[in-house]
């Protein structure tokens, strides 16, 4: 093909039709088919995998959307573009450089012009939209169901959304009609036709007409699940039904409800746990166990004074108490420690192999990290045999889905490997962090930077400390001062603050000395500091 210094990635050309193609990165991104024919030229800084026949792309620092032939559907003029979660019409959210938000469809037509302060996820075909300091909702056709009059809104649940006017909360339906007066300082969301409210220090429940059906009489409540709710009076908790009647009297200090199994883990005193059936209201296990862990995959660990076993979702003993330490089941396998050695067992309590380990981690697909001795880590397969012999001082993680792991040897550094023990980037680092949101922190010459999943440096090592990427941003620090980097490799807030926290929607809270301020990633102050 005559293309040099390129990286190839096999990514579905169209997720619905599963046509094969390659993304190529050689400074720029493009698309070729399996014959090597160039379909989309190499002019993009980034291309996402195609979804519903569209790819979100970046070119010359701006974001747009293209189709599988490289035609521009949404022009490259936006600060950010993303898929609108839960949208039935497969809409996109976008942000202009002025930080104004809008919604656009698959054909590039505006559903909501980019003139709004904020837009949120689509839930039950309703999108929360903010203009100045007030909120309302629009449908996926861009039709508003009410005026911008609410100071806060929550997502629709069961056809109703909690909204706040002034100091008080109420509810609206999907037509925007208010179903009750705004008189409560706190409300929950509707679940099984009821929502809790808080009034004069007590909790009760209303129905979808705004009528009180269970009077405010509890000091704490949960949402209803499978017809039951955990309710507390003073310091004791019990279970009520949809009529507000006690099914389990309030006599327990702790209750954990598992509606899918019709079970309650209860305790009257510390280290005195038992199990109750909500269908029969009878005790299955007496209140004598030190701990009953959470159910995972229908199994829960039960701790006695010195041994641990497992019960199933019926409350029956599935694996007798004989282990000294255990982990939760994951994909039908748990790690257990017996007589100082770790091994893997299935849900019947049978060992998956005779192999035992000094340490072992949960499986990622069909592979797991395990150690034969102190500082002797390798990679094992589904039947417990080593496919990478134990040789590493550290084996930080391995992800089978990405065929990528991170290992280290003292005096030789850190590097990324595949399941065949190949150094996939051909590089070693003084230190490295696992990948998060497509980027990994790497340290060279006592300075930190970031690489992408191709191994390219997107931010050169220059910082004293970094954090992993989260919500598209990472903290970067020089000496004791902190700033923010974005996924494009730009330092959007210089390291000059004591603390920075991501608030949401491109907004950060900043602390310097005794001052606090709020700054958008566009470097526009919401609440400026005095310099």
Image (tube, helix red, strand yellow):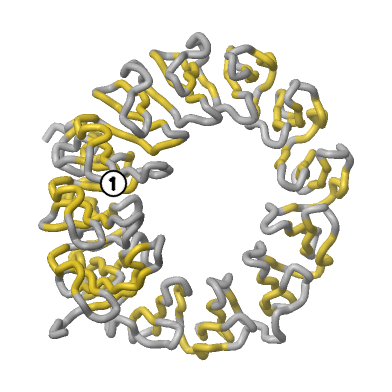
| Pointer 1 residue | 106
Work out whether 43 lies above or below 529.
Answer: below
The residue lying at 79 percent from left, 22 percent from top is 245
Write down the quadrant of residue 268 in the picture: top right
Q: Is residue 141 visible?
A: yes
Q: Position of residue 458 (x, y in %)?
A: 20, 66
User: Looking at this view, is 127 or 511 the one in front?
Assistant: 127
Q: Position of residue 203 (x, y in %)?
A: 63, 20
Work out which quarter of the rendered image holds the C terminus and state it.
top left
In what element is the residue under mark 1? loop
User: Looking at this view, is 338 or 491 the one in front?
Assistant: 491
Whether residue 286 sits left or right of residue 176 in the image: it is: right
Q: Position of residue 275 (x, y in %)?
A: 81, 46
Write down the quadrant of residue 163 in the picture: top left
User: Looking at this view, is 114 or 321 the one in front?
Assistant: 114
Write down the quadrant of residue 43 in the picture: bottom left
Work out whether 388 lies above or below 167.
Answer: below
Work out whether 407 lies above or below 523.
Answer: below
User: Looking at this view, is 108 or 151 the one in front?
Assistant: 108
The residue lying at 21 percent from left, 62 percent from top is 69
């Amino acid at each position: 093909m005559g293309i040099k210094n390129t990286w190839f990635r096999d990514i579905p050309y169209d997720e619905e039709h599963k046509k094969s193609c390659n993304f190529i990165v050689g400074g720029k991104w493009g698309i070729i088919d399996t014959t090597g024919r160039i379909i989309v030229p190499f002019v993009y800084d980034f291309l996402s995998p195609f979804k519903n026949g569209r790819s979100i792309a970046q070119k010359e620092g701006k974001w747009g959307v293209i189709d599988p032939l490289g035609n521009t559907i949404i022009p490259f003029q936006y600060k950010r573009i993303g898929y609108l979660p839960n949208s039935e019409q497969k809409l996109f959210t976008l942000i202009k450089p002025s930080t104004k938000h809008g919604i656009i469809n698959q054909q590039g037509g505006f559903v909501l012009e980019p003139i709004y302060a904020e837009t949120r996820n689509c839930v039950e075909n309703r999108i929360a939209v903010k203009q100045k300091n007030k909120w309302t909702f629009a449908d996926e056709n861009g039709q508003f169901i009410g005026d911008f009059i609410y100071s806060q809104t929550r997502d629709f649940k069961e056809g109703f959304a909690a909204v706040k006017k002034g100091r008080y909360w109420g509810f609206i339906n999907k037509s925007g009609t208010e179903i009750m007066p705004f008189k409560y300082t706190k409300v929950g969301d509707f679940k099984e036709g009821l929502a809790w409210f808080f009034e004069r220090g007590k909790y009760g429940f209303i129905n979808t007409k705004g009528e009180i059906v269970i009077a405010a009489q509890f000091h704490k409540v949960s949402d209803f699940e499978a017809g039951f709710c955990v309710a507390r009076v003073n310091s004791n908790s019990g279970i009520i039904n949809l009529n507000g009647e006690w099914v389990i009297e309030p006599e327990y200090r702790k209750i954990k409800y598992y509606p899918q199994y019709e079970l309650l883990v209860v305790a009257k005193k510390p280290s005195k746990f038992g199990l109750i059936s909500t269908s029969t209201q009878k005790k299955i296990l007496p209140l004598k166990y030190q701990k009953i862990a959470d159910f995972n995959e229908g199994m829960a660990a039960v701790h006695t004074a010195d041994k641990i076993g497992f019960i199933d979702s019926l409350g029956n003993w599935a694996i007798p108490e004989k282990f000294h330490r255990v982990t939760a089941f994951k994909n039908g396998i748990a790690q257990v420690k017996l007589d100082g050695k770790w091994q893997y067992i299935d849900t019947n309590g049978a060992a998956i192999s005779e192999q035992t380990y000094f340490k072992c981690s949960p499986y990622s697909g069909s592979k797991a990290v395990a150690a034969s001795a102190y500082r002797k880590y390798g990679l094992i397969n589904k039947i417990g045999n080593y496919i990478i012999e134990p040789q590493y001082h550290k084996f930080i993680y391995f992800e089978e889905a990405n065929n990528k792991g991170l290992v280290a040897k003292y005096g030789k550094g850190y590097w990324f490997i595949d399941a065949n023990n190949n150094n996939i980037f051909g590089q070693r680092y003084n230190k490295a962090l696992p990948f998060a949101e497509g980027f990994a922190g790497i340290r060279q010459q006592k300075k930190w930077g970031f690489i992408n999943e191709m191994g390219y440096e997107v931010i050169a090592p220059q910082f004293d400390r970094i954090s992993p990427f989260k919500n598209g941003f990472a903290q970067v620090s020089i000496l004791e001062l902190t700033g923010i980097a974005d996924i494009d490799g730009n330092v959007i807030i210089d390291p000059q603050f004591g603390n920075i926290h991501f608030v949401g929607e491109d907004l950060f809270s900043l602390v310097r000395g005794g001052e606090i301020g709020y700054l958008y990633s566009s470097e526009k102050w919401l609440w400026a500091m005095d310099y």
